[in-house]
Amino acid sequence: MEFWPIGQVPMNLRLSRFPLPVVLAASVLASASLVSAQEVWPMPKVLPTVPPGVAQSTFPLPRVEWVTRVAATNAKAEKVKDSVNLIFDGDSITDGWQTGGQQVWAERYGKLGAFDFGISGDRTEHLLWRLSSGQVDGFKPKLVAIMIGTNNLGARQSVEDTIAGVKAVVAEYRKRLPDSVILLQAIFPRGAKPEDPFRDKIKAVNAEIAKLADGDKVVYIDFGDKFLEPDGSISPKIMADGLHPGPDGYKIWADAIQPIIDKYVPAK
């Protein structure tokens, strides 16, 4: 396998659709601040492309503008992997545990050996690429909490492709961490009003991924109704933009999954 030399941008990236300043900035960041990250997570020289006839949602793909973020996260995780009992993974909603949900995170998971791999904007294919690049290699968590898929729908991928993508993520985590229990969380409701077109799409995805629960290594939970008002709307206090939880939203989330956390990762 070939890897990028530190600070060197591969030719296929320089000739891509990304503006030169963006590419150069990524190169500078990689060389200036991520030497140690690349030592434990070298970035691939050749970026993959989706083969003909393959659903994009099921194929491991990197997001070029965020490879340095992935490298830094993996380098941070490498230092603590022996003590990680609980993994959270997903998109900006999961990433938000470190911002809007940081107080709840500190209170609930700070002493449990928890690590958050979530990255804002990620779709299933991005999470698959992170896993295929060794994100959790060598980890032995007791529980892995996953929520992914809303950005697939937001990117106008079909309900069917989104379902396939979530299934692929669960299968990949099961393959890489066979002794861990997967806590598969339903995609949260989206859109301030109940008639928002995302609502029905999310329900359709959730109805199918719920079938992945096997009563043993995959546990499924859907608590989306807890974010809703009696009329089906989402209060700005819970999700200001109808998508990302605020501090109150993260409290609702933590309360909903606490019994599962207590079962598999009990506090010492």
Image: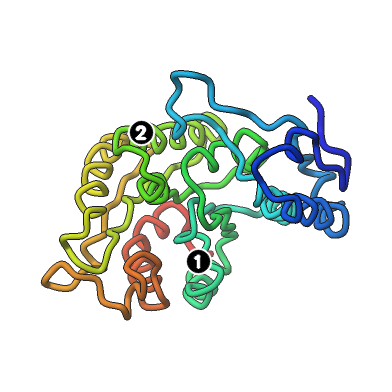
> Horizontal and vertical percent for residue 45?
77, 33
Mark sitting on residue 267: none
Q: Is residue 105 above or below residue 74?
A: below
Residue at x 62%, y 33% (from the top left corner): 132
Residue farthest bottom in this picture = 237
Going by the numbered disc 1, the residue's amino acid type is Gly
74 or 155, which lies in front?
155
* Quadrant (top left, top right, bottom left, bottom right) of the N terminus: top right
Residue at figure coordinates x 42%, y 58% from the top left:
261
Q: For numbered disc 2, what is the local secondary structure?
A: helix
Residue designated by label 2: 161
x then y, percent, for residue 212: 32, 35
User: On the rendered structure, is 231 left or right of 81?
Assistant: left
Residue 172 x, y percent position in the rendering: 51, 32
Answer above or below: position of 121 versus 172: below
The crowding category of the residue bearing disc 1, from other C-alpha atoms within 10 Å (few below 14, some 14 to 19, many at least 20), is: many
Give x and y (percent) for residue 33: 84, 59
The three-letter code of the residue at mark 2 reads: Asp
Tag count? 2
- Residue 82 visible? The answer is no
For marks 1 and 2, the one nearer the N-term is 1
Q: Closer to the camera: disc 1 or disc 2?
A: 2
Label 1, secondary structure: give it. helix
Residue 96: image tag: 1
Find residue 39 and report its image quarter.
Answer: top right
Q: Quadrant of residue 163?
A: top left
In the image: residue 13, left or right of residue 206: right
Q: CA distance from mark 1 to mark 2?
A: 25 Å
